[in-house]
Image: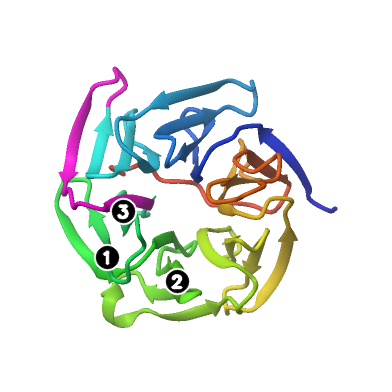
Amino acid sequence: MRAELAVAVREQAALGEGPTWDAAARRLIWVDILGSRVHTYAPETGRRTVMATEQHVGAAKPRAGGGLVLNLRDGVGSYDTDGSFSWLLRDPVPGRRGNDAAVAPDGALWAGTMRYDEAPGGGTLVRLAPDGTAREALPSVTVSNGIGWSPDGSLLYYVDSPTRRIDVCPADRELATRRRPFATIEAGAGVPDGLTVDADGCVWVALWDGAQLRRYTPNGALDRVVPLPVRRPTACAFGGPDLRDLYITTARTGLHRPHPLSGSLLVLRDAGRGLPSVPFGG
């Protein structure tokens, strides 16, 4: 049966990003980076919430025990269920902000950064463990983007967008020295942005300026192309109670005449089967 593309949330987010299924709350979390907003959407009830943040927010992920962990302009912060905020890792650098982030199977947060001017080598990728210790996994990237793991947790997939590649590395090795190309996006097809890995081990990636999603098999072969009505899809994640619906965030920033759905949250129903998400902290 052909998957059906629909509008989950009609919105005008400047830079929608980072969809994440929060299984405990049965809701999808996503952000508008430049709008400094964290959105939630519960597909079973249609309930939505919007929370303003004091800084640009690259990603928001559920925490074990409740609350959210956020990849912000000046570092990684935490919101408790009562709304109180605290810094987990504060590292302000002028001209730099947090971008995409993901929680590993062990509960650690991998948080990327980039410069606003996208200067080469101006970003990083940091692993923040549940106990608060941090290490720099990659010291010099440009636009740190999609991060994901294979179903068995043995492989890590990563996108530094200007390379036009999805890279892969054994999850227990140093990413800086052991990563290799997994799939390369040809010129003119868009730029790889956020990604997710499904239960079959296939990698789905959103192509910024490419108006499409792509699915690659575990051996890196192009398996499926999903055309989209919007020019700038940014990321994708499986959600819903059975993890069969693929949610897609989109952007309208920088577009002279954006499509009416640019900035909305889209959903490709019955697209496959996703992997359960892990909250920060295990």
Q: Residue 122 carries which label?
A: 1
Nearer-N-terminus badge (1/3): 3
Question: Decide: marks 2, 1 in contact (CB < 8 A)?
Answer: no
User: Where is residue 31 shown, x and y percent of the image?
Assistant: 46, 38
> What residue would you read off at disc 2?
162
Q: Is residue 147 magenta?
A: no
The quarter of the picture where residue 187 lies is bottom right
Q: Residue at x 52, y 59 (%)?
A: 195
Nearer-N-terminus badge (2/3): 3
10 Å crowding of disc 2: few (<14), some (14-19), many (20+): some
Left or right side of 103 for 216: right
Classify mark 1: helix, strand or loop.
Answer: loop
- Stretch in magenta: 80-101
Q: Does the magenta stretch include residue 90?
A: yes
Nearer-N-terminus badge (2/1): 1
What is the three-letter code of the residue carrying label 1? Answer: Gly
Classify mark 2: helix, strand or loop.
Answer: helix
> What residue would you read off at disc 3?
111
What is the three-letter code of the residue carrying label 3? Answer: Ala
User: Looking at the image, is 172 positioned above or below residue 261?
Assistant: below
Label 1 vs label 3: CA separation?
14 Å
Label 2 vs label 1: CA separation?
12 Å
Of all residues shown, which one is farthest toward the top?
82
User: Where is residue 82 shown, x and y percent of the image?
Assistant: 29, 17
